[in-house]
Image: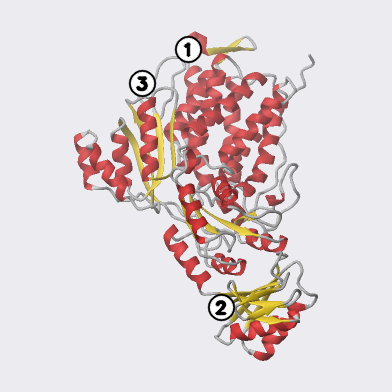
Amino acid sequence: MVTVPGVREVLDGAGLVLWGELCLAGLERHCDEINALNVFPIADADTGTNLLATMRAAVVAARITVDRSTSGDGTAERPDVGRDDRQDAPRGDRDTVDGRDAVSAGVIAGAMARAATAGARGNSGIILSQVLRGVADAAQAGPLTALSLREALRRAATLVREALSDPVEGTMLTVLDAAAHRAADCPESELAEVARAAADGAVKALGDTPSQLGVLRAAGVVDAGARGLLVLLDALVAVITGQTPAREEYRAAGASRTGRTEGESAYGDVSVRRDEDSVSEIAGHTSASFSAACDHGRAPADPVVLAREADAPRMPQYEVMYLLSETDTARAGDLRDRLARLGDSVVVVGDGAGVWSAHVHCADAGAAVEAGLAAGTLSEIRIEGLTVRVQSASGGADRGILVVAAGEGAVRLFEDAGATVLDGSAFDVTAETLLAAIRRMPNREVLVLPNGALGAHELVAVGVAARGGIGANASRDVLMLPSGSMVQGLAALAVHDGGRIAVDDAFAMSESAAGMRWGALRVARERALTIVGTCARGDGLGLVGNDVVVIDPDPRAAARILLDRMLGLGGELVTLLLGADAPDGIGPELTAHITAEFPGVEVVVYGGGQPVDLVQIGVE
């Protein structure tokens, strides 16, 4: 085999140190970019900062390991942050490179993984620590090869999913899965090709994240943590091949940038409006029971913790992190479940050497710490107030809007507003299809705008079934909003604010929908008796709600009469949603009629493309 200069066939301990250095440099270079993309799970603009701090801890540990190895005593110690049980590395933990002893890949990767777990910052930092642990586990047998790199990525993806209380697709874990799958499917046997395949898979998956997570789509960004993961994979390609993949800067939709990357989705026109990044201050919020427990070095009684879990508000206010020792896998799993009842963004991971790192966003920091004390011995406790960039139109970090709509134009309107759409254009929406759509939503909180697709009794049944699921659906909150038409759904979505708690958001949206009187223009399909008389086939029918109030042989005349009656009760804004079979020119015609007969009333016309209704009318 011909060895190409600059291309590594294996990645030994020295190569892993260099990889760490390149990761650190890349994260420093892209820190602001990643921070600006940060809208999930909390829009606090710190994902880049957290990844950088975590990787810095790992790189410092790698440097210390190498320095101690070459200091003359022939030993390589484990530089565990916050731990005093360092041990000498045995002779078997060393590689021979060019006839010289060097610290092995397993020792370097293990030191980096332990230090990253102990020094992790934020949700993304803990996930990064598990990527490094995957590498460490795979490198125990020797330098990293094409085969062991595949195993490292597969192991990392498994560890991350096991660590999360509520895995959400369209995030860092999804992109890690894609990188692992692409590496596993790579037909080449060279380390460089497997690394390139993993990075290419990550690029494609990163571009797809907005299609998987509504809050990203609404903000026009890709996932911030996943962008950071791509930095790590690109650094891996660079250290193995000597060439750094060219990537463009990811910005929010509408921001200027140059070029496109291969595999980028249509959502890749990314990046973000910049707010001033703020650093959370250490919160002074600590409960009396927590202080007492710390003073006595013991965990409080379980009933105290359980009472806090029952009373804890749903809106996260604090980020709580700590290290946990003197515990085991089962107790760590119990802690993960308990923290999930207190808040969200829960991650509990181990470093493979008996120390665990826990992370949660919650309203009661004291209860989160008490839960940890019940599981083992705590250290490195960090409590930070969450500083959130509120984006009124982008939805909450863990809340999605599901809309039932029909017609290409209507579907596009709702999607552009950040909603996930169940398109009923080609089929009748049933209780079963709506329930399935709700269960596909990645969010813990789901607000549903049925837009008249189902009756009230069916919606109640769907809501009960959706809230009574298992697994990821077990803790889901589903709220059905009273939208009887698509124009009412548009009115509700216009006031959606993810900065509010779910019940307040649902109330405001419901109030907006109820405040819109809606009607529709249709054509009678057959002779029928209505509450205002008998209609003939082809007559224009004007409906207010679901009741016929106007019959006229000319559908255009029926539309004008309907508008007169609806605006006769008052109104400042009229929304016209034109259907697929709307008569030519009816939009401008009705706009002119409103302007002439009701001066001062604003008119908005959209092409909905919906069937049945020639025009849907909303009056606010």
User: Residue 161's x, y, as percent?
Assistant: 51, 33
Q: Do we see residue 82 in this rendering?
A: no
Residue matched to label 3: 85
Task: From the viewer's side, name the closer residue of 366 and 135.
Answer: 366
Alpha carbons under labels 1 and 2: distance apart: 80 Å
Q: Earlier in the sequence, mark 3 or mark 2?
A: 3
- Please state if 42 lies on the left or on the right of 243 as rendered: left
Q: CA distance from mark 1 to mark 3?
A: 18 Å
Expressed as whole percent of the image width and height from the top left, the position of residue 206 reads: 64, 43
Q: Which mark is residue 620?
A: 2
Of badges 1 and 3, nearer the viewer stands 3
Q: Which residue is mark 1?
A: 74
- Viewer can see residue 474: yes
Expressed as whole percent of the image width and height from the top left, the position of residue 101 reads: 56, 12
In the picture shown, does residue 564 fall above or below 330? below
Distance, label 3 to label 2, CA atoms, is 69 Å
